[in-house]
């Protein structure tokens, strides 16, 4: 298969974009890119989506499956919002039928906004998590997902004791981990320190190490959350120290938010090569604060962008990138649109340790691609249009590993 059009390809190693005004991308039957080259003058292949730019598929490094139907519910800052809105909705996921009705929809929403890879929190319910993996398998999308682990400080309807949770995690690994040549992965997800007993935190970390699984959790999203965590774990030096004390100490740990970290915590995130999911839209919505993105990326920390649906109000990663731009401006520490588009693609792949397969348009990478309508212009003008013209930028097509999962078929000669 060959696709033709304008291509914005992230540089694999630097936060910049390579602009191909008219390129041919050749893809094997297995969905691997073999070449990208300027279109020859005598080429008979038409533009695949006239008026669109082709990019790597967007990578969403933080998304909550059971929060789709409460997207945009304004019920206060983080802890109040969890109690008032989130936990009652997540309790509904005890019903497998309800979970199944959401699972296919959330996959369709991701694909329709050009997201090809996502790191997804399920609820605490094994049946709901099975439904999510089943929908992901059918959709063709790439994902890291798992049970959301909670055994305290939440209603019984959304908690699971440590022994049962680990048994269910093991079953998920047997059925789903590395499914379809690594397209689907099981992740270990302690929701945050306040929702997990020390026993559950330690057992989950041990399980993740034993199976070499990605860990997803929240860190320092809200000042009251930070205060309560310090009170609940007085023996730990700080919030990050809670996770370190229970075995989360390596590059397989993905930390969402990281708004209120101390200098020492940032240094330890860097030194341990932990990754960060920056979720600016939800941080604005819940009034949590603005993460120092400029500082994190200049320190060489692996950073991806996260929609954080449902506190985040959109599945669109360009809109999330625009929120990141705004947050950086508020802090007086600007981050350029080019860097942000790089973070929404290549940065996310690095955060998820998928750097050899996704996030680039280059030989040897999987053909995870999105075609988005943009006005013609310079690289700068096109990038600005992708991020900041919210009423434009229709996603024309989405591909994962060369398979179309959304949108219009490419034009053929």
Image (cartoon, rainbow, N blue to C red):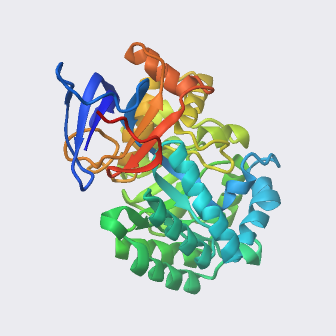
Quarter assignment of residue 131: bottom right
Q: Residue at x 74, y 60 (%)?
A: 86
Q: Quadrant of the N terminus?
A: top left
User: Residue 107: x percent and y percent?
Assistant: 55, 56
Work out which residue is located at the far front of the displayed protein and give it.
413
Q: Nearer the viewer, residue 265 or 377?
A: 377
Q: Nearer the viewer, residue 178 or 284?
A: 178
Q: Is residue 292 visible?
A: no
Q: Quadrant of the C terminus?
A: top left
User: Residue 360: x percent and y percent?
Assistant: 30, 40
Left or right of 159? Residue 213 is left
User: Residue 362: x percent and y percent?
Assistant: 23, 39
Q: Residue at x 53, y 27 (%)?
A: 387
Work out which residue is located at the far top of the displayed protein and give it.
377
User: Residue 272: x percent and y percent?
Assistant: 37, 53
Q: Nearer the viewer, residue 397 or 182?
A: 397
Q: Is residue 365 visible?
A: yes
Q: How many numbered marks, from 0 up? A: 0
Left or right of 54? Residue 325 is right
Q: Nearer the viewer, residue 286 or 197?
A: 286
Residue 182 to residue 326: above or below: below
Left or right of 266? Residue 191 is right
Q: Residue at x 58, y 61 (%)?
A: 104
Q: Residue at x 56, y 29 (%)?
A: 322
Left or right of 75? Residue 247 is left
Residue 12 to residue 391: above or below: below
């Amino acid at each position: 298969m060959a696709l033709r059009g304008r291509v914005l390809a992230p540089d694999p190693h630097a936060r910049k974009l390579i602009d191909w005004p008219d390129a041919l991308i050749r893809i094997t039957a297995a969905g691997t890119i073999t070449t990208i080259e300027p279109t020859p003058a005598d080429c008979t292949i038409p533009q695949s989506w006239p008026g669109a730019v082709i990019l790597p598929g967007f990578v969403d490094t933080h998304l909550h499956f059971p929060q789709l139907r409460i997207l945009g519910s304004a019920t206060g800052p983080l802890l109040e919002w969890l109690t008032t809105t989130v936990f009652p909705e997540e309790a509904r996921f005890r019903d497998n039928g309800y979970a199944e009705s959401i699972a296919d929809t959330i996959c369709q929403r991701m694909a329709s906004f050009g997201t090809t890879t996502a790191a997804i929190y399920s609820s605490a319910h094994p049946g709901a998590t099975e439904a999510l993996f089943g929908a992901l398998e059918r959709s063709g999308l790439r994902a890291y997902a798992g049970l959301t682990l909670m055994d305290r400080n939440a209603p019984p309807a959304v908690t699971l004791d440590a022994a049962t949770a680990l048994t269910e995690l093991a079953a998920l690994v047997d059925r789903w981990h590395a499914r379809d040549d690594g397209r689907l992965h099981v992740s270990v997800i302690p929701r945050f320190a306040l929702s997990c007993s020390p026993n559950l935190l330690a057992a989950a970390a041990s399980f993740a190490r034993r199976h070499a699984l990605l860990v997803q959790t929240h860190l320092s999203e809200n000042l009251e959350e930070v205060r309560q965590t310090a009170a609940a774990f007085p023996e730990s030096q700080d919030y990050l120290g809670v996770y370190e004390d229970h075995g989360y100490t390596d590059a397989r740990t993905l930390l969402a938010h990281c708004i209120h970290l101390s200098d020492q915590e940032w240094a330890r995130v860097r030194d341990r090569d932990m990754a960060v999911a920056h979720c600016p839209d939800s941080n604005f919505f819940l009034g949590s604060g603005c993460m120092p993105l400029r500082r994190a990326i200049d320190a060489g920390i692996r950073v991806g962008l996260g929609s954080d649906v449902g506190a985040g109000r959109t599945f669109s990663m360009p809109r999330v990138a625009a929120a990141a731009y705004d947050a950086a401006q508020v802090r007086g520490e600007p981050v350029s649109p080019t860097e942000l588009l790089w973070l929404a693609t290549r940065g996310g792949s690095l955060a998820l340790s998928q750097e050899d397969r996704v996030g680039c348009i280059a030989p040897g990478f999987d053909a995870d691609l999105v075609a988005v309508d943009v006005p013609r212009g310079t690289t700068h003008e096109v990038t600005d249009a992708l991020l900041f013209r919210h009423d434009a930028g229709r996603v024309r097509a989405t591909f994962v590993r060369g398979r179309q999962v959304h949108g219009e078929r490419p034009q053929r000669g």
